[in-house]
Image (cartoon, helix red, strand yellow):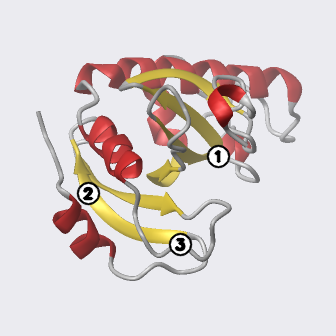
Amino acid sequence: MKTMRRAEVEKLAGAPDGLGWHFKVHSDLFEKQVPVIISKGLVESSDVIEDYQIDALNMFLNIDPFQRITVAQLLFSHCKFYNEIADYGIDRRDESHPCYATRPEDVFKKITGEPQVIIQAKEWWKNLYCVISFSPEWENEHGVVLVVKNGHIIAFADYQDYFYDFEPPGRNGGE
């Protein structure tokens, strides 16, 4: 089990900007370094990475690499959905079409840039969450966000309000 301790996270993260802390970590899931943002959230005056945010980062680092299959399947279904609703002015059978993918693993060829991990954990949530954000060719305006709950990739979500379907506000004394 991989564990990053507070000192290591703080050294990598450095000083926060207006959004939070930015750094890269090695992901076994993606077999490469990926950017991480630990969000300040609504407490913009906070200059402290909270323990539950470090827990959420460690949860991400310990995602079973075999879940890459789940990532591919979720992205593939999102891609196919966009293939049905969006008109890109290109024949859908053309390989240059943003939604052209015949198998789930093909969608990774349609992702521009790196996946980005965003940690917005709240200490009042019952579960640990993070999101993995992708910029695919078929949805380059908002991207695609996959929700990770307790180490399992469970769904794709709207590009806003990532967790409210899973941990609604007001639950357990939250916002």
Of the image marks 2 and 3, the number of the one nearer the N terminus:
2
Total labels: the figure holds 3
Q: Which residue is mark 3?
A: 46
Badge 1 amino acid: Glu
Residue 105 drawn at (x, y percent): 42, 24
Judge the density around disc 1: few (<14), some (14-19), many (≥20) Cα neighbours within 10 Å.
some
Residue 43 drawn at (x, y percent): 63, 66
Q: Which residue is mark 1?
A: 137
Label 3: element kind: loop
Judge the density around disc 3: few (<14), some (14-19), many (≥20) Cα neighbours within 10 Å.
few
Q: Is residue 124 above or below residue 52?
A: above
Label 1: element kind: helix
Q: Is mark 1 in CB contact (under 8 Å) with mark 3?
A: no
Could you tell me which residue is drawn at 21 percent across and 39 percent down?
28
Q: Which residue is mark 2?
A: 25
Label 2: element kind: strand
Of the image marks 2 and 1, the number of the one nearer the N terminus:
2
- The C terminus appears in which quarter of the rendering? top right
Residue 37 drawn at (x, y percent): 46, 61
